[in-house]
Image: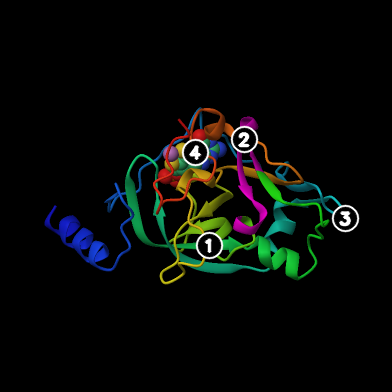
Amino acid sequence: MFNRRKHEEDVRREGRLPPGQSLTLKFPVLHYGPVPSFNPETWNFRVWGEVEAERRWTWDEFQQLPRTKIVMDIHCVTRWSKFDTEWEGVSVRTLVDEGFIRLKDTARYVIQHAEYGFTANLPLEVVLAENFLLATHFNGEPLTPEHGYPLRGVVGYIRGREDLKTPYFWKGAKWLRGLEFAAEDRLGFWEQAGYHNDADVWKEERFAR
Ligand SMILES: Nc1nc2c(c(=O)[nH]1)N[C@H]1C(S)=C(S)[C@@H](COP(=O)(O)O)O[C@H]1N2
Ligand SMILES: [Mo]
């Protein structure tokens, strides 16, 4: 308890605690519905929509993509924040820069599609920023099933990067199966349920109404 309080004082002083948030040392699990199972034989990852060519990677092929590590603070709309979390996986920016994904000029939004039809939407510039990752590992270990194994979107705050927009953590879909690049925005699962579409943690954009 003392430990938690002290950590919270530290991040508050450093300006890293967004309004209305409190620090947790745990890693709460939050999602709608059951945890899906994973079959590496049938799993694939698809990219479609406003792209020059649709892509589909098997689990083995996905392992061969270039990998990136980032350290971020993550902020849940239910008011817990977790600091200095380390994520490893595949950067969408890298996939675009290295030609694995070729975007059309018309691509302006990205819909993450996960198991059971769950979706989360973000503007393209957020998905292409350094604080968004298709993550396979958390703190050096593969994701656990309840945190999205084998793949999830993650988005958070990178220290000192006030230039990047930081949305709440719900904008990262667990059990991710594909990215749809779109010309028009379309509300995802939680956004349709009344969560704020922009979800900026510093502006406390929690709910739309
Ligand atoms: N597939 C899927 N991903 C999801 C959700 C969900 O319901 N389904 N919930 C989101 C919400 S509301 C939050 S706060 C985070 C929680 O991630 P965690 O369980 O790893 O803490 O996952 C997000 N990703
Ligand atoms: Mo959430």
Disc nearer the start of the sequence (1/4): 1
Picture coordinates of residue 27 (x, y %)?
35, 48
Q: Mark 2 points at which residue?
A: 187
Q: Distance between the residues labelled 1 and 4?
A: 19 Å
Give the residues in magenta: 112-126
Q: Name the residue under label 4.
A: 196
Crowding around mark 1 (Cα neighbors within 10 Å: few <14, some 14 to 19, many 20+) is many
Disc nearer the start of the sequence (4/2): 2
Q: In this view, does 49 lie to the left or right of 1?
A: right
Is the shortest distance between ligand 1 and the CB of mark 3 under 8 Å?
Answer: no
* In the foreground, 69 or 42: 69
* In the foreground, 24 or 40: 24
Picture coordinates of residue 54 (x, y %)?
84, 50
**Residue 192 part of the magenta segment:** no
Disc nearer the start of the sequence (2/1): 1
Q: What residue type is labelled 2?
A: Leu
Residue 52 is tagged as 3
Crowding around mark 4 (Cα neighbors within 10 Å: few <14, some 14 to 19, many 20+) is many
Identity of the residue drawn at 67% across and 68% down: 66
